[in-house]
Image: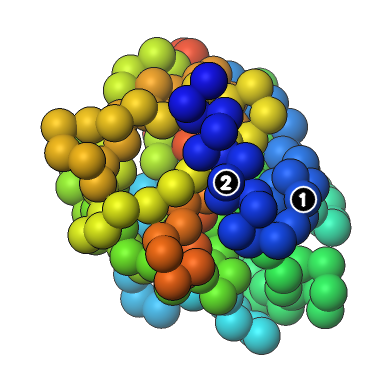
């Protein structure tokens, strides 16, 4: 009950509805850990990343050998590429569509399927003007981030997010409510299977947006 009251407080302070907080778009219901490598601005990511949103961005994907299908899906598009060249990086220039992909949350999911039926995926979230700073303890790693975070771990495991000040929160539909952690400015979050979204807000109405993904199985393949 307390969590619901806090969530309603958050909504009232933001002056918006649940739908505007959480667009409700989730690209598919993944069951495996996202592990596809990709490179952005000479930085290599393994499976997941939160990137600064830009008007144009080049992402180089390391696709598995013998990939026969490669899909890039967001809240507003699905692009399909048959038999891409897996001997080189797959270069993709992402230009967000105005008023659809450049506002609020618009997660990108990439999927590669090989001729052996193996599937490997990647997840990329983009900042959307949020300013609140937080520290995520996710799957054994601690990272300080600003505005947005993406946490992937096995379903049911407890992760933590900590702020430098008191915040209120709102949780997406059917998502486990955050519980107070070891200090009053931190929260423990048990991961639900699939995706969940959370927003945290301080007294100055600065926002932090957290997306979690709880996987249930691991099926790795050799990507090169």
**Residue 9: image tag:** 2
10 Å neighbourhood of mark 2: few (<14), some, or many (≥20)?
some
Q: Which residue is mark 1?
A: 17
Instruction: Please name the residue shown 55% across and 75% down the image.
Output: 129
Name the spot of residue 220 as percent of width and height, x first: 42, 26
Residue 159 as seen in the image, left or right of residue 152:
left
Name the spot of residue 46 as percent of width and height, x first: 37, 48
Front one among 13 and 64 = 13
Disc 2 and disc 1: Cα gap in Å?
12 Å
| Residue 149 to residue 217: above or below | below
Residue 20 visible somewhere in the drawing: yes
Instruction: Please name the residue shown 64% across and 50% down the image.
Output: 11
Q: Earlier in the sequence, mark 2 or mark 1?
A: 2
Nearer to us: label 2 or label 1: 2
Instruction: Please name the residue shown 35% across and 27% down the image.
Output: 179
10 Å neighbourhood of mark 1: few (<14), some, or many (≥20)?
few
Residue 128 as seen in the image, left or right of residue 181:
right
Front one among 127 and 73 = 127
| Residue 41 to residue 166: above or below | below
| Residue 85 to residue 39: above or below | above
Mark 1, secondary structure of its residue: loop
Instruction: Please name the residue shown 31% across and 23% down the image.
Output: 158
Residue 219 visible somewhere in the drawing: no
Name the spot of residue 193 as percent of width and height, x first: 54, 19
Front one among 195 and 15 = 15
| Quarter of the image that includes the C terminus | top left
Front one among 162 and 94 = 162
Name the spot of residue 101 as percent of width and height, x first: 76, 67
């Amino acid at each position: 009950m307390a969590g619901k009251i806090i969530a309603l407080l958050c909504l009232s302070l933001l002056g918006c509805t649940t739908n505007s907080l959480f667009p409700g778009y989730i690209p598919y219901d993944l069951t495996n850990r996202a592990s596809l490598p990709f490179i952005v601005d000479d930085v290599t990511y393994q499976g997941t990343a939160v990137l600064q949103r830009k008007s144009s961005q080049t992402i180089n994907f390391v696709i598995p050998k013998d990939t026969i299908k490669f899909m890039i899906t967001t809240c507003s598009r699905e692009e399909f590429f048959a038999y891409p060249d897996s001997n080189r990086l797959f270069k993709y220039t992402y230009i967000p569509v105005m008023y659809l992909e450049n506002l609020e949350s618009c997660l990108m999911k990439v999927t590669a399927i090989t001729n052996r039926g193996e599937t490997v995926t990647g997840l990329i979230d983009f900042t959307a003007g949020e300013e609140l700073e937080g520290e995520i303890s996710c799957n054994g790693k601690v990272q300080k981030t600003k505005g947005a975070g993406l946490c992937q771990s096995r379903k049911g495991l407890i992760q933590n997010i900590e702020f430098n000040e008191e915040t209120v929160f709102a949780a997406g539909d059917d998502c486990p409510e955050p519980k107070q952690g070891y200090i009053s400015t931190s929260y423990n979050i048990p991961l639900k299977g699939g995706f969940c979204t959370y927003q945290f807000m301080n007294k100055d109405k600065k926002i932090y947006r957290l997306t979690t993904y709880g996987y249930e199985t691991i099926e790795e393949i050799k990507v090169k």
